[in-house]
Amino acid sequence: MFSLESLLETLKTGSGFWNPIVWVVAITIIFLLVYVLRGLGKKEYKKETGQTQAFLSGNPEYEKELMHVKSSNMYWGFTETMKSIYTVLKKMHNGNASDYVLWFLIIMAVVFVIVGLV
Amino acid sequence: MIYNIPFIAVVAMIFIGLYTVLFKRNVVKIVIGISIIESGVNLFLITLGYREGGVVPIFTGAPADVAANAPGSMVLPVPQALTLTSIVIGVAVLALMLSLIMHIYKKYGTLDVRKIRRLKE
Amino acid sequence: MNWFELITTHSPALIVATPLLAAFLTPLVSRINDTVRNIFVLIMLSITGLLVGILGYDVLTNGIRTYVFGGGSTVVTLPSGLVFHVRIIFEIDAMSIFMVFITIILAIICIVYSLSFMKKEDGLDKYYTVILLLIVSILGMELTGDLFNFFVFLEISCITSCALIAFWVHKGEALEAAFKYIVISSIAALFFLFALGLLYTQYNALNMAAIANAMQANSIQFGLLDRVAFVLIIVSLAMKAGLAPMHMWLTDAYGEAPASVTYIIIGATMASLYGVFRVCFTLYGGIFQTVVISSFSIGWIIVILALVTILIGVIMALIQTDFRRLIAFVAVAEIGYIFLTIGVGLTTLSDPNMIAVGQTAMQGGIFHIINDCLDIGLLFLAAGAVYYATKETSLNEMSGLARKMKYTTIFFLIGLLAVSGIPPMNGFASKLLIYESTYQLNPIISIIAILASIMLLAVFVKVFYSAFLGPKISKFENVKEVPKSMLIGMGVIAGIIIIFGLFPNIVIQYLVEPAANALMSNTQYISAIFGGV
């Protein structure tokens, strides 16, 4: 049903193009190159000694279950800096059913003013 | 002027219904407010079809002179069909909302809409 | 005519009638056996899919098809020469059949998935009946050419999906989400009916083609009643589709419904979005193409609201801890992308040297509808699989699920890459079209869109790390892989995502471009009813 040529065509946007088959071929060649370069590394190291343990700046390493970061602590730096935005947004989403209808009426009033005036 | 009174009543009913939905705390009052808005919209649809001096839009039972000057003397029938459909839909929605309120009261123990908000942020 | 033409002629009515018949027969069939009922529902939906394929092939090769309920021609001509259209007419052009394709794929995968997701619940015959009624209402919304018919199907979808969201009655949060959903939906539908009354009193017609014809007949003016009706319809349908800041019911409803139900409610949201497309571009298209300043301002207000939607969706998704609620916020952000292209299309509609930008934006938006349904749907199905296996919903308690649930991890990874717009998945192709076309309207829009995509990747890295990677916990010792029908459902969607990603040009050439061209000018839509008048 589809000719081979139309399967391999590029997608032209107004100002650029995108061809996924060429991209997949390029990525496989790059992966093969990276794999070959990785295989050229040093193979002689002593297992089970201090050479294969993680370095945590001198801190002791706990067992794996305690070291797993919980998901609400993960982006702490980001949420701390954007605290002003987050307090506004959390107050907006307060879960009150009447406030949902209030937002609907506010947006309708704004769009009325803009469509009516222009 | 007197023919504008139904339209003023429609706007008043919609505003009263919206005030009830926005500012009342009891969940049952919010449902009553939605029912008032629906009555207002139905009244609007019926008032649209009124033509002055018109009779009921039943074609076979009309008097003889109505058929002669046909379209101007009957009230419009299409909005009446729309209103019937809308009333039936409104009854179904009202039944569903009230049964949900019954279950919510068993789970939350309160009918205050500012306390039924475990899903926030 | 031979039987093939007979089926094609009657297929619009059969597509709506077959699931309706199945919905009313399901309680009878389920008295026999459970397996017989499941097979019956699947067979009826496959017949509907076959009819959709036949109708789609016909519409995409031959043009617009109309179907008059009650027989006869589309118009009734009085002896004095006046032309009236008095019957309910289904009118199917390329945009309608595109949305019907999406809906039937969503419906079949939803039923296949819920065969084993819902196996242990009771009350299943009511579940299948109400899901079939919801599928009927979504298909009806997308096939019809009549505004009041659209309102009736909208109300049916609102009632049935409210009953499905509250399926787990023993949880309080599901009831609360269903109550908020039905309050919002009934207010939106009532304002839609009010606007419908306004349009009827002005133009004495309920058919979309007839109203569009009457609007551009004598002299193009955008009077007060037209403006009021336009604002009421657009804001009501945009609230049903999830534009911010009216999106909060969407995150509650998607987060608390069972996963297969969420999958079909995505279809209902897309049908309301289709309504916005139809009203903006076909009903009012003739006015916007000549009155320059009004479409410019309306387009810009929709663009600003869409940008707010994208930003709110992504920023709030970063701090969620509930798995499905997080994906619901991402769904809100993706709807913002589609509204962005509606706004860009409206802004450039009346400017002749920016028409190409508008067309590329519309193609990107319409392609993004199907990509969004598939990607977000796959993420919801994977989240449902995790809930089925572990009975946990909070991300803080999960860790190390990739050891036992290998296939679910792979499908979640494919969905994650597709939503963030990473090549070679289909999300990248549609987002590239959106970035490139909105850049030419104003560069800031494109910058905010790209930033939001990067933050989406950040959100999903957090989810993938905390749910699937990491050490194994003792309470997840007995977790097994999910049953086969859920895996088949997810696998089909992942396969479609990869195929659409590797060959986007075929999809755009055969499905998306006819839809975008059908929306940009409404003369063909009108002349299919009025026959060249």
Image (tube, rainbow, N blue to C red):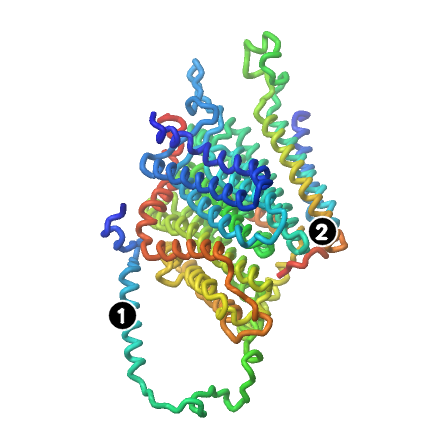
Q: Position of residue C279 (x, y in %)?
A: 47, 39
Above or below C245: residue C463: below
Using the image, name the chain to which the residue with label 2 belongs: B
For residue B17, side relative to residue C245 (left or right): right
Q: Which residue is mark 1?
A: A29
Number of dots carrying numbers: 2
What's the mark number on residue C89? none
Q: Position of residue C323 (x, y in %)?
A: 56, 63
Q: Amino acid at mark 1?
A: Ile
Outermost residue, front direction? C32
Q: Quadrant of residue C52?
A: top left
Q: Position of residue C437 (x, y in %)?
A: 36, 54
Quadrant in which the N terminus of chain C is drawn: top left
Occupied quadrant, residue C48? top left
Q: Residue at x 53, y 51 (%)?
A: C114
Identity of the residue drawn at 71% across and 53% down: B113
Placement of C18 over or under C181, stated as above or below = above
Quarter in which the C terminus of chain C is drawn: top left
For label 2, the residue is: B104
- The residue sitting at 48% across, 44% down in the picture is C42
Under mark 2, the amino acid is Ile
Q: Is residue C343 something that shows in the picture?
A: yes
Q: CA distance from mark 2 to mark 1?
A: 60 Å
Residue at 54 percent across and 43 percent down: it is: C37
* Of C465 and B17, the residue lying toward us: C465
